[in-house]
Amino acid sequence: MGNKNINKNSIVLLLGLAGFIVMADNWVVSPILPAIAENLDVDIAKAGLLITAYMIPFGIFQIIFGPLADRYGKKQVITFSIIMFSISTGLCALGSSLTNLAIYRGLTGIFAASVMPISLALIGDIFPMEERQQAIGTFMGISFLGQGLSMAIGGTIAYFLNWRGVFIAYAVLALIPTLLLILNYRKLPSEQNPNSEILKPYFKLLSNSKSLFTYLIVLLEGIFIIGSFSYTGAFIAKIYHYNYFSIGMILTAFGITSVIGGRLSGKLSKKLGQKKVLSSGLLSAAIADMIIFYFGSNIYLLILGIALLGLGFILTHSTLLTRATGFAQKARGAAMSLVAFCFMGGGGVGTAIGGKIIVAYSLNSLFIIYGIALFATFILSTLLIKNKDMEEL
């Protein structure tokens, strides 16, 4: 399959670079949220809408990009999207108010929408199931390394320059995978299915209990894990009054454990089974939130909590992703798009609800509420998710 001048592992690395910058940009607002709020003269709960403004379009446009990729080719869609993503990221540096910055973040989310799910769909196309978990682990590791470095890079630039400089830097970095995709365009494999429909694959996926339950857990994961992480930077700023560089470095613990967990998840799934890895991830995330709530005033335990949140996230999400690649062979773009729709849409909703919780109660109370909710999600997953559900639908 595809051109012989580029092997499967090289494709994973190339897609990983695109995922690296998208995930770096995806999480960039969290460590600099206090800086944006201060500069634009808005409170932290309102500034949190910037995360929602990115995540909800990111999720919604999965529904569009997935079937387009199945019909017209995955490499065509992902190359166009990464070009527009680079432009939109640069526009964010020009934001002069919460409103227009939210619009620019929304545009960035729209064009970023195709990169992760279509990359995963491509991996599903070229790797057989027995090799797929390791390939996804490698791709996820590279991508979430971008997330991990995002905390340190974003915090450092915001500290020494300002938050606008962060978006300028990311726009420049986005040119690297953009140029590599253009230069290697002809070498990338691209399956097309001209008869692919927009809505039919989604009805099929949601009408099957196996895939429906998986997407439900992805939605809840997004609401409570991303909803928690979105405000950890603000929590550190409130409790410790640290500068943005220090906040970014502390949040890097999330990214580091995501990378480590991404590399280990495939081996753990083979040894323990997917259901146990999924349960371990949700439990880790629940415990992480409770550690932050009860012991967040101790910096070492706070870092432990953030690290556990990252580990819990990657164990949960990589397992759910691998399951989803087996849901639809001819409409894999749609299957992976629905995962991203549920996850990122859930993250946007969870962040918005988190803002309401902060206003009604306190910033700290967010973590105990979401921690309990994650424990409930763990119980729900044990009831709904079966260990052997990997056959094609």
Image (cartoon, rainbow, N blue to C red):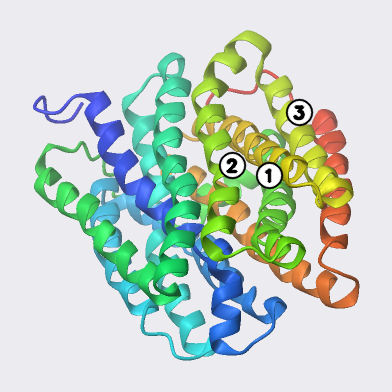
Tag 3 residue: 279
Whichever of callouts 3 and 1 sits on the residue coming sooner in the sequence is 3
The residue under the point 60% across, 80% down is: 37
- Secondary-structure class at tag 3: helix
Instruction: Give the number of marks.
Output: 3
| Residue 253: image tag | 2
Q: Position of residue 22 (x, y in %)?
A: 39, 54
Asked whether disc 2 touches disc 3, contact meaning CB atoms under 8 Å apart, the reply is no
Q: Nearer the viewer, residue 191 or 199?
A: 191
| Residue 306: image tag | 1
Q: Position of residue 144 (x, y in %)?
A: 47, 42
Q: Say whether residue 248 is left or right of residue 145.
A: right
Q: Is residue 112 above or below residue 290?
A: below
Asked whether disc 3 touches disc 1, contact meaning CB atoms under 8 Å apart, the reply is no
Q: Type of residue at label 2?
A: Ala
Q: Type of residue at label 1?
A: Ile
